[in-house]
Every structure is written in structure tokens, then in C-alpha cells.
Amino acid sequence: AAINRTLTSGRVEGVKGIKNKYNIKRDILDTAFKIKKATSAVQIGEIKASSKAIGLSHFQPTFSFNKRSTTKYNKKGVGSTRLHKGTSAQFGQGVTIEIIKGQKKTIPYAFMISGKMPVFARGKYESSGAFAFIQRHKRAAVSGSDSPISSLTNISVYSSLVNNRVMPAVSIKINAKLQERMTHELTFRLSRMQSQ
């Protein structure tokens, strides 16, 4: 019971720790953790976090067109465009995102399609598992579809948890909770034995 209650508390602390540092939506975090409970036969439990990369569309992207218009998307995925006066150029200036809270970054080669949430870029991710994006600087074909074009992703819930920004504080709280629960369980069992 002590282990399983600690696992539940650990999941809560993990979500809190990530939310304190990263701009990841709560609904993603709520479904990203799985708990494998301990049993009387196996006194080991696990908390697993999803390693699936999160699309950049989940980090409130802002796509700018060379001072002509700016499109912003809120947390519900609703976009709004503001037109700027005095310019006619329509070259994209990249997409600005905020993954770590308070740290906005612009990806100059990224773009968005009007009315669509995914953040795209010309290129593709390596198939070797290195998770590196290889940007394409020119057309792959003389005519027709200008591919490959990929939807950009970034961190996963797992990588946002097991790093020096989050994990040390979460580990301290989980260990403290386990000691608290173990002490409570032992005290309860000893009191029952003494009353018999």
C-alpha cells in the first residue's frame, strides 16, 4: 500500500514539476503517465511517462509574415490574424514558440498554413533515431509537390521530466513521501500487533 500510494503521489508531483518549468498542456500530461502497481508478490512499482514527441502546435505558436500579418494560436487552438499596415512583402519570418516557460524562441525556417495548427518545415527527421531534423534548402523536384515537408515536434513528457530542471525536486518529494508512508504503515501494523 505504501509503494502504490507513493506512486500516485509521484505522478502528481511529476505533473506539477513539469508544469512549473514547461509550457505543456495539462490534458497532455494527464494522459502521459502510466502506473504499474506493486503487488504482494512483487514489491516493485513503476511510473512510466510517454516518450512520444509533442508537436510544436501545442506550444502556442506565432507565425509572422515579414511585418504584414501575425497569426497567433491560443491554448484551445483558435487562431487570430492581425494585419500590419504599410508593407506588401509576404515572406514568412518563422514561428515563435514557448516550450520552457518565459523563454520564447523563433524557428526561422518553420511555417504554418492558414487555419491549420501543425508547425511545418521543409525537410525531415533522421530515421536513425537521433531525432535530428535535416532542413531542406531547395526544392526536391523541379515541379509538382515540394516535399518532403514535415510537422515539427520537440520534447516528450518523459524528457521534460528526467532532466536537471525537474527531476531533482520531484525525486526529493517522492522519497520523502515514501518514507512517510512506510513509517505510517509500520506504525499501524505495530499498533495492531500490540493490541492483539
Image (cartoon, rainbow, N blue to C red):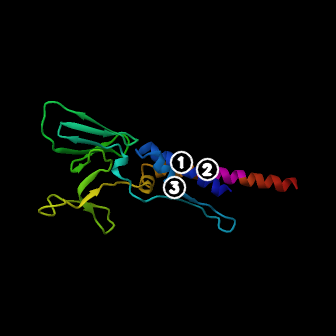
Position of 140 relative to 116 (above/below)? below
Q: Amino acid at mark 1?
A: Glu
The single residue placed furthest to the front in the displayed view is 144
- The answer to whether the residues at label 1 and label 3 have Cβ atoms under 8 Å apart is no
Q: Are marks 2 and 3 in contact (CB under 8 Å)?
A: no
Q: Which residue is mark 2?
A: 177
> From the viewer's perspective, is 125 left or right of 165?
left
On-image quarter of the N terminus: bottom right
x and y, in percent, of residue 168 in the image: 48, 51
Nearest to the eye among marks 2 and 3: give it. Answer: 3
Q: Residue at x 33, y 42 (%)?
A: 103
Report whether 159 appears left or right of 172.
Answer: left
- Asked if marks 2 and 1 touch (Cβ < 8 Å), the reply is yes
- Which label belongs to residue 33? 3
**x then y, percent, for residue 83:** 22, 33
Which amino acid type is shown beneath numbered disc 2?
Lys
Residue 178 within the segment the image draws in magenta: yes
The disc labelled 3 sits on which kind of residue? Phe
Image quarter (top left, top right, bottom left or bottom right) of the C terminus: bottom right
Helix, strand or loop status at disc 2: helix
Q: Residues within 10 Å of mark 2 (few under 14, many from 20)?
A: some
* Main SS, magenta residues: helix
Residue range corresponding to the magenta coloring: 175-184
Depth check, front residue: 105 or 185: 105
Q: Sequence order check: which comes first, mark 2 or mark 1? A: 1
> Residue 155 is drawn in which quadrant?
bottom left
From the viewer's perspective, is 102 left or right of 171? left
